[in-house]
Image (cartoon, coloured by chain):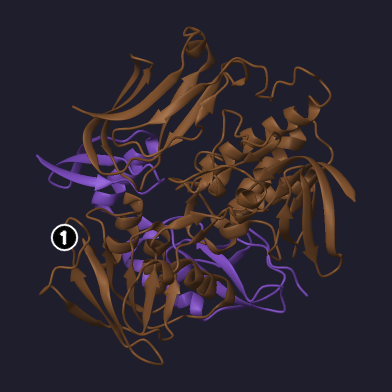
Chain colours: A brown, B purple
Amino acid sequence: MKNYDIVIIGGGPAGLAAAVSAKENGIESILILERDKELGGILNQCIHNGFGLHTFKEELTGPEYAGRFIEQVNELQIEYKLHTMVMDIRADKVITAMNREEGLFEIQAKAVILAMGCRERPRGALNIPGYRPAGIFSAGTAQRLVNMEGYLPGREVVILGSGDIGLIMARRMTLEGAKVKVVAELMPYSGGLKRNIVQCLDDYGIPLKLSHTVVDIQGKERLEGVTLAEVDGKGKPISGTEEFYSCDTLLLSVGLIPENELSGGMGVELNPVTSGPRVNESLETNIEGVFACGNVLHVHDLVDFVSEEAKAAGKNAAMYVKSEGITDRPASDKGKKPCVRLKATDGVRYTVPETIHVDRMADTLTVRFRVGGVYQNCFISAYFDDERVIHKKRPVVAPGEMEEIKLTKEQLEKYPDLEMITVKIEEA
Amino acid sequence: MEERNLICINCPMGCALAVTMNGTEVVKVSGNTCKRGDIYARKEVTNPTRIVTSTIRVTGGDESMVSVKTKEDIPKGKIMDCVKALKEVTLNAPVCIGEVILENVADTGTDIVATKNVRAV
């Protein structure tokens, strides 16, 4: 069995940034395992621009952004295997993987970084009635077909869900000569970024129908049309509002789910809200030496923040490996004073991380979260036990846009008996 | 004085911008959190522009498509002409990131550059 200090599962933006960071923090023995034919993950099919303003201070497309990190991985001579599928990870960090050259093989790691990303919610999870003809795609599948394989999936398109990939694909299909008739969104607000509504829908005169959903799918061999209807406050279709749209293609952009089969299999505890691992300030899961970052941890809007998070995970994994054999290991929960817990409430759906060991946190810690609804002129507040310490005014917050607060070590050290930080939305 | 409200599209922050106009002249931009927002707002109310991204067919490479973009933003009205011009082009591998694929696309004064490496096979 081969041994590595750090094995990274997934060679997308999170895996690449984690690998670079681990190497820069002094770890030589690193292996990235990637199931696709190339590094870069989903960025390779995200050919639109808007990536990298935070990381590189310039505006890049997805493949260019990935290219920068792949270059660093190559320069730092970090080892990776392509076409390699990880089948299983054990709690003792033995990884079972397979590929065509080596067959089935095992690797022993000292630390594991989970960076498997997420996948799209499929039609089967939506309970749309009607036939099951050809012509129904998840938005990301259509994106891959158009941008990488060079196929146009259809000519007349309806999009269900206003997630970012759906919005991006509305524009992309239009540029390729298809007619995008409408984007329907079940919720009364968009699930995607505002900028994408402007530059992908408004620019091309594509209507966005909020509080609408697909209630019927017609066509036996190929899709012939869908029926949209308005929904009430509980998401139930309102009878009499049905409207038929003829189309040959239905794209679904109805949410992303972190891909955690491997994590669950090794006993990593998952948060039911994010479907990602529960992590502490070091982005370490409940299993010591197993870290998580990127969309496998919680779905991000912005790759720049994935890279930032992955950089922290890579550094923390490096510190964990270097502290091996030291009894008072910094990255160990055992025998330490109890950690500070973070509680999400009043409009805040979750926080990443969920616990903080003040003694091991970096000087500044970014706590990321999403809200459950649209709030205007509100405050994002953090209470240290009963005392309100952070009170940040926000003109508008929405579920489609991730929020954050920053905590400093200095700030937390002033509260030695702190047990809980409560993060909530307060309306003005 | 007239006020126009825009959403900045430069980055995913999506700042809500307010542009105060006196006729066609921009008097003030507010709501932006960086310089890009100011530049965007001034352009958007006078001559709106966009970066256009698309793909071009490649032969003899390890990929069948290569992603491309306009090097600078081009007038919004030229987007469709630009995409049409790309339909006419087929490339031979290899292609490198940053390589100029098409000069002065659709008379915009801007070049089309590759955004992905495609190796020859």
Q: Is residue A102 above or below residue B7?
A: below
Q: Considering depth in this image, is A362 or A385 the residue closer to the camera? A: A385
**x and y percentages locating residue A352 in the rendered image:** 49, 35
Q: Quadrant of residue A191?
A: bottom left
Q: Which residue is mark 1?
A: A232
Left or right of B28? Residue A372 is right
Residue B112 visible from this viewpoint: no
Left or right of A80? Residue B91 is left
Left or right of A45? Residue A78 is right
Q: Quadrant of residue A344?
A: top left
Which residue of the protein is positioned furthest toward the right in this rendering? Answer: A1
Query: If the image is split into quadrants, where does the C terminus of chain A sit?
Result: top left
Q: Chain of mark 1?
A: A
Residue A395 visible from this viewpoint: yes
Q: Amino acid at mark 1?
A: Asp
Q: Is residue A200 above or below residue B42?
A: below
**x and y percentages locating residue B65 in the rendered image:** 60, 73
Q: Is residue A111 above or below residue A171?
A: above
**x and y percentages locating residue A260 in the rendered image:** 58, 53
Q: Quadrant of residue A4?
A: top right
